[in-house]
Image (cartoon, rainbow, N blue to C red):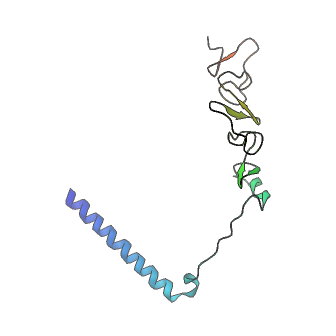
Amino acid sequence: MKTLFFVAMVMVLAISLSAESGWEAIKGRNRFLSEKSERVVLTCEKYPKICHVEGSSGSDCCKNKCVNLSTDGSNCGKCGKQCSYGKICCQGKCVNPRTNEKHCGKCGNKCNANSSCIYGMCSYA
């Protein structure tokens, strides 16, 4: 079994070395492949509309990252406002989901009028 593993590793090494030398040969023949291409990096500080693109983390820009100020625990309600340990960000406010009756266990989970939030559950007892 060890011998088979050793042979497989030697084959992988040989293939990777030949692939690199083949790429260098191709790169040397074609001037378009040999030139370094410069990538354009779009940042939300320069282009704030990129945070509104579908699939973005959020529509707000904090420290050059797209975030959602309503739910981001590191930017809760405003950039740089971090929720303390055990708290989560709900509607832009840091709340304790273990005791908050409007956000019991998770954001938006409201307990009934005759129950309370204990350990993140409504009507625990």
- On the image, the x and y values in percent for residue 121 come to 64, 20
Q: Is residue 2 left or right of residue 94?
A: left
Q: Quick one: quadrant of the N terminus?
A: bottom left
Look at 50% across and 83% down and name the residue there. 27
- On the image, the x and y values in percent for residue 98 come to 64, 23
- On the image, the x and y values in percent for residue 16 come to 38, 72
Task: Say if 20 sits above or below 68 in the image.
Answer: below
Q: Nearer the viewer, residue 69 or 107?
A: 69
Task: Say if 40 sits above or below 116 in the image.
Answer: below
Q: Is residue 89 left or right of residue 19?
A: right
Task: Say if 23 sits above or below 56 in the image.
Answer: below
Look at 69% across and 39% down and name the residue there. 82
Look at 48% across and 84% down and name the residue there. 26
Task: Say if 28 sits above or below 39 in the image.
Answer: below
Residue 79, by quadrant, is: top right
- On the image, the x and y values in percent for residue 108 come to 73, 29
Look at 37% across and 77% down and name the residue there. 18
Q: How many marks?
A: 0
Q: Quick one: quadrant of the C terminus?
A: top right
Residue 3, by quadrant, is: bottom left
